[in-house]
Amino acid sequence: MDFEPLKLSSVGYVRKDEGLQETFIEILPEFLEAVEGLHEGDWIKLILWFHRSDTPEGRRVLKVHPHGNPKNPLTGVFATRSPYRPNPIALYTVRIHRMEGNRLYIDWIDAMDETPVVDIKIFVERHDCPKEVPIEEREVHIEEGRVIGEVNVIPRKSEHLDELEEVSPEEYDAVVLGIGPKTTTLTARELKELIEALKEVYENLPVEIKDRLE
């Protein structure tokens, strides 16, 4: 079993300050602009490369005893979180506790100091914690989605009226709303009520503020 070198660029490294009991991601200067849009309190997905497992022997391992305990039956590595696997990629979900310069201070993780960070992605509940939802992913109109502050508004794709004659506004799920990592759906009736509520909030804004929005 031969492995060709994979052309990945480290965007940063895991750093651990054992004295202060802190873990942070150090972003390399050339990738610092990619951090724009992340905020303290955000949940993110870290994709790491377990460099110490990146050996011919480690990458040939296809079965392990889970948790390194020989009492556990041999299990295919794709069904485990073992660092030994054909491609030693690690995945963590962590929270950004604070941001200082090129450092993202996060929850403690068991990755070693100097572990390369391959990528960082924002945590999105509907993608990262899939569950049964009224609107399937193929039915949402991603291209028409809008991001307003921390609110992600993704409409449902329009469908032919003859397919909806028996569906009431209370039954028709019209839009996916993402607020930070959380996701929910609104029916057509709920969407109408939300729009009316937002209009009322807007009308009650101070005149001085509304004038500046024109």
Image (spheres, helix red, strand yellow):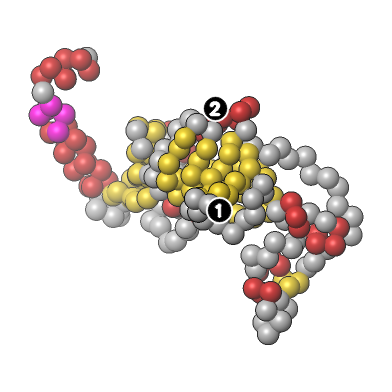
Given residues 63 and 104, the one toward you in this image is: 104
**Image coords of residue 89 (percent x, y):** 68, 54
| 105 up-or-down from 199: above or below | below
- Classify residue 70 as left or right of residue 188: right
Q: Residues within 10 Å of mark 1 (few under 14, many from 20)?
A: few
Task: Name the outermost residue toward the bottom.
Answer: 71
User: Which label number is shown at residue 33?
Assistant: 2
Identity of the amino acid at label 2?
A: Glu
Magenta span covers which residues? Answer: 201-205
Q: Name the residue carrying label 1.
A: 18
Seen in the picture, residue 65 relative to 144 is either above or below; the reply is below
The amino acid marked with disc number 1 is Glu
Give how far across and how far down residue 199 sits, in percent. Answer: 16, 32
Quadrant location of the C terminus in the rendered image: top left
Compared across the picture, whether 206 is left or right of 47 comes to: left
Q: Where does the N terminus fall, quadrant-wise?
A: bottom right
Residue at screen point 55% across, 49% down: 17
